[in-house]
Image (tube, grey):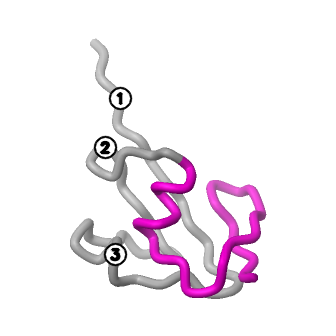
Amino acid sequence: MAKIQINGKKVAIKQNFSILEMLKKYKINRKKVAIELNGKILPQNQYNKKKLNNNDIIEIVQFIGGG
């Protein structure tokens, strides 16, 4: 298991989980978010390639409509 932090909350995930797998686990629509991984914005085309490691810090910003 790897321990990571998502939006300030510590969670445990499987080792070698990808960003895309994490989004699916938490039922987050990948087309409506921006992901910051360890202080850097991650392009959407990297969500399936980037594997999470122990102590990674993730910030997820979800876009919502309104006005």
The image quarter containing residue 20 is bottom left
How far is mark 2 from mark 1, CA to CA? 8 Å
Quarter of the picture containing the N terminus is bottom right
Answer above or below: position of 41 versus 62: below
Residue at image coords 36%, 55%: 34
Q: What element carries label 2?
A: helix
Mark 3 vs mark 1: in front: 3
Q: In this view, does 40 lie to the left or right of 16?
A: left
| Magenta segment includes 32 | no
Of 17 and 4, nearer the camera is: 17
Of 8 and 4, nearer the camera is: 4
The image quarter containing residue 54 is bottom right
| Magenta segment includes 15 | yes
Q: Is residue 43 left or right of residue 52?
A: left
Q: What element carries label 3?
A: loop
Which residue in the structure is indicated by mark 1? 64
Quarter of the picture containing the C terminus is top left
Residue at image coords 45%, 70%: 19
Which residue in the structure is indicated by mark 2? 32
In the rendered structure, are the residues bearing label 2 and label 1 in contact, judged by CB atoms less than 8 Å apart? yes
**Where residue 49 sits in the image (x, y, percent)?**
34, 83
Which residue in the structure is indicated by mark 3? 48
In the rendered structure, are the residues bearing label 3 and label 2 in contact, judged by CB atoms less than 8 Å apart? no
Q: Give the range drawn in magenta.
A: 1-26
Indicate which disc, 2 or 1, sits on the residue closer to the N terminus: 2
Mark 1 crowd level (few <14, some 14–19, many ≥20, 10 Å Cα): few
The image quarter containing residue 43 is bottom left
User: What amino acid is at disc 1?
Assistant: Ile
How far is mark 3 from mark 2, CA to CA? 16 Å
Indicate which disc, 3 or 2, sits on the residue closer to the N terminus: 2
**Where residue 60 sits in the image (x, y, percent)?**
49, 54
